[in-house]
Image (tube, rainbow, N blue to C red):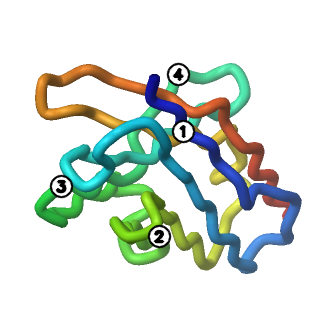
Amino acid sequence: QVQLVESGGGLVQAGESLRLSCVASGTMFSIYDMSWYRQPPGKQREMVATITSGSVIFYADSVQGRFTISRDNTKNTVYLQMNSLKPEDTATYYCNGASPSRRYYWGQGTQVTVSS
């Protein structure tokens, strides 16, 4: 059973930073593509950033240059460093893991609120 547990969310002011963490258990973490998604209030879930098992990285245009995704395979952890936060970054942030056979797993989410 794969489990993903996010942490690091909170309430910050615009321009500040947060770092989200997602710890995986029950799987060979290093072979998974890992992503962060977010779901703003009343909107659909959207991809924020992806880091593949080979450390190829993709970002949504809205966060390019402000957010950094990284992974530490020795700790089974993926991170999302979020700088220069904006009110429109307010959302529930979810960790996602994709196995080589394209099975997908989700964490429970962590809330990020950015006040103006």
Task: Give the Cα separation between the discs numbered 4 and 3.
Answer: 26 Å
Image quadrant in which you'd find residue 65: bottom left
The residue drawn where x is 66% and y is 30% is 108
Task: Give the Cα separation between the discs numbered 4 and 2.
Answer: 20 Å
Q: Nearer the viewer, residue 3 or 53?
A: 3
Q: Position of residue 50 (x, y in %)?
A: 30, 52
Q: Which residue is mark 4?
A: 44
Q: Position of residue 99 (x, y in %)?
A: 22, 32
The residue drawn where x is 27% and y is 33% is 98
> Up-down: is 52 above or below 66?
above
Would residue 67 appear left or right of 28 to someone viewing this image?
right
Q: Which residue is mark 2?
A: 67
Q: Earlier in the sequence, mark 2 or mark 1?
A: 1
Q: Position of residue 10 (x, y in %)?
A: 84, 58
Q: Earlier in the sequence, mark 1 or mark 4?
A: 1
Q: What's the amino acid at mark 3?
A: Ser
Task: Give the Cα separation between the discs numbered 1 and 3.
Answer: 16 Å
Q: Residues within 10 Å of mark 3 (few under 14, many from 20)?
A: some
